[in-house]
Image (spheres, rainbow, N blue to C red):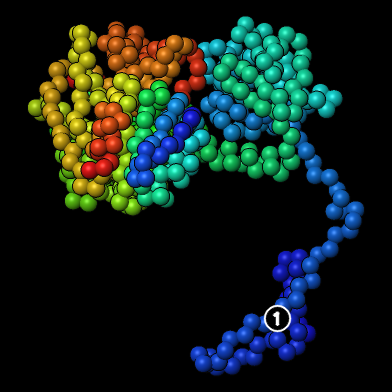
Amino acid sequence: MGMLVTAVDDKITKVMLNGRLDTVGVGQIETSFAATLVPPGKSAIVDLSGVEFVASMGIRMLISVARAMHQRQAKLAIYNATSLVQEVFDTVKLSDIVPIGRDEDDARRIVSS
Amino acid sequence: MCSVALGREVFRYAAGDVPQQEPDDPQRPRTTPRLTASLPTFSRHEAAQPVEQVFSLVVAEGREEGRRIALSERAVIAGRDPNLDIVLPDDDVSRLHCLISVVNGDVVVENLGSTNGTFVNGQRVDRRTALPVGGVLRVGEHLFRCERCTRRDLERAEEEYRDLQRAASYVQTLLPPPLLDGPMRTEWMLQPSARLGGDALGYSRIDDRHFALYLIDVSGHGVSAAMLSVSVLNVLRERVLPATDFKDPVGVLSALNAMFQMDRHDDHYFTIWYGVYDSFDRLLTYATGGHHAGYLVPVERDHARALKTSGPVIGAIAGACFPAAQTDVPAGSVLYLFSDGVFEIRSAERQLRLSDFTTFLTLPIAADGSECRRLFDQVKSACRGRPLEDDFSMLVVTFP
């Protein structure tokens, strides 16, 4: 599981994830994902185009971090999910908890609003 | 000087340190008596005694990941046979697959005629082969690492393994027995991918016309997921949600959502399919919390009707709404409820999805009536015998 962090600007962090967000993949990045996004109190967008599969542990990680960021008045949005991943998100109604953008611009607009 | 013996240690009070028995005066500063301990001493010979080291196999990948198995001169056999020391219930593992033992201070592996082969560090074993410490043994999709550890560590690991087995057996005792006779019949299968799983299921008669059935899937698997699934299962079994009518799926899911918010449960959420069958009106009322559809297949088996509503996962949103829906239940219909571990599998070529699995549902019913086994075999066949990555849970209900 790979994770690449860049700064979009001084208010938004961008994270690109690659691989499978299953138990093994989540175990590899969960701590650094949370440590990168939660403490600064900045909003973040997560590009999922490189994520081929998301299991319940992956959804749990996204929800937990989004909730922790919300407590710091920061927002998290995800975007570019593949159709297989989007199907999983639709089943659990993830968009009720973590906003899902159509693309990077849409995700940036969501966290900036 | 007085002394007090506690186990192997002797504590001595110096004369002035012994507290006097006086009336309790809250203004008086409390002093702690000064203790000097006479600790046991060891001779140089005792301290230098070597700690006994033993060989063990650690499951690095496979169904019992983390389990540690003792190795000795007495050979252990791995294979599909359920009576073996190492049971590997996969299609690409032979009944008696390979033998592992310690010979002249080395761990050695022998293939027992398995056609799929046994591998040590990637090399196929065709004669007795040494497995060095740190080396990897592969049997089918299962990987074992050879390690040396102290006997004490090994005993601790074995005790932990037995504990987990007892916990898994406790979870099984919470599940209802299959209903084999009577107008409504049920069967189920629950196969955790780890030693403990996060799935649970159940059903019970609420009154003479209503029958409740449900399946829950806690995020992740393993001990913490299992503990939450047992909590939820007990709440549903004993019907102890406050001010809740268990004939009302909306009320049940709303009450569960209030009771099991993620921030109070180690950030775990769960999904649920909950339904109530009214046998007088032949109606099934159901609601889902982040769970995929259950499927109702009529006796003609010409289609599978998806039964799902749009509620979110349980625990993520305080005060979330959980709509319900209703369907008629034609005589002889079969309802299939299952966890996502049933279809979130990888074939040799790709990741499968729900629609791949639902095509299996309308195939002819199993000759022996065991639909769970038929579908489990279909799934195992689809993933080419690889171990399942998630819990496989299924509840099948045949309506009168």
Across and down, in percent, residue A98 comes to 29, 38
Q: What is the crowding at mark 1: few (fewer than 14 residues within 10 Å), some, or many (at least 20)?
A: few
Quadrant (top left, top right, bottom left, bottom right) of the N terminus of chain B: bottom right
| B45 relative to A108 in the view: left or right | right
At horizontal 89% and vertical 58% (from top left) the residue drawn is B43
Residue B361 figure quarter = top left
Report the number of numbered marks: 1
At horizontal 55% and vertical 92% (from top left) the residue drawn is B28
Question: Seen from this angle, which residue lies furthest left?
Answer: B281
Q: Is residue B356 above or below residue A46?
A: above
Q: Is residue A30 visible?
A: yes
Residue at mark 1: chain? B
Disc 1 marks which amino acid?
Answer: Arg
Across and down, in percent, residue B126 comes to 73, 8
The residue that mark 1 highlights is: B34
Residue B225 figure quarter = top left
At horizontal 79% and vertical 41% (from top left) the residue drawn is B52
Q: Is residue B290 above or below residue B256?
A: above
Question: Seen from this angle, which residue lies furthest front?
Answer: A9
At horizontal 29% and vertical 15% (from top left) the residue drawn is B355
Q: Is residue A66 visible?
A: no
